Image (cartoon, rainbow, N blue to C red):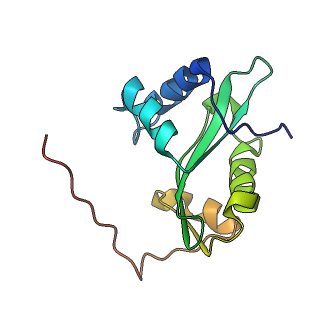
Amino acid sequence: MMSPIYILTPSQIIDLHRLYHSQWWTRDRTLDETRSLIEHSSMIVGFTDERRRLIAFARVLSDFTIKALIFDLIVDEPHRNKGLGKALLQTILKHSKLSRVHHFELYCLPEMTSYYKSLGFKDLNHELILMRKDRDR
């Protein structure tokens, strides 16, 4: 398996922005928002192809003690079903900076729950309600 990267080059940020535009939940993000969320995430993890283009990515927001919330796990379409998503999660779960974290959490669509359950996550839907307040623009 390839080695993870934890810092993105300017061209890899553009690759990430392209990946974001391929997904329904990140399609509307601007390049400036992409740069900002990278800068303000607690950790980012990615994998690149042989030409150093970003092909898989995830980011984490954490207090490094109790919670780590995993966001934006994306694998480029031509590189799916090769274990990159699992490798991203394992890299995050085993990273020394996150070794004290009690709970790793993520959001997913119902059709993805079996995949995440196979990696040790459990459905807390009966215990928690996701709530959101959008900022007035």
Q: Is residue 55 above or below residue 83?
A: above
Q: Is residue 2 above or below residue 128?
A: above
The quarter of the rendered structure image containing the C terminus is top left
Q: Is residue 73 left or right of residue 125?
A: right
Residue at 76 percent across and 46 percent down: it is 83
Residue at 21 percent across and 58 percent down: it is 133
Asked which quadrant contains residue 44, the reply is top right
Q: Position of residue 52 (x, y in %)?
A: 73, 21
Q: Nearer the viewer, residue 66 or 115?
A: 66
The quarter of the rendered structure image containing the N terminus is top right
Q: Nearer the viewer, residue 98 or 116?
A: 98
For this orientation, the residue located farthest to the bottom is: 127
Q: How many marks?
A: 0
Q: Nearer the viewer, residue 71 or 82?
A: 71
Q: Is residue 112 left or right of residue 133?
A: right
Q: Is residue 104 above or below residue 108?
A: below
Q: Position of residue 56 (x, y in %)?
A: 65, 36
Residue at 62 percent across and 32 percent down: it is 76
Residue at 72 percent across and 36 percent down: it is 5
Asked which quadrant contains residue 94, the reply is bottom right
Q: Position of residue 43 (x, y in %)?
A: 60, 48
Q: Is residue 42 left or right of residue 90?
A: left
For this orientation, the residue located farthest to the right is: 1
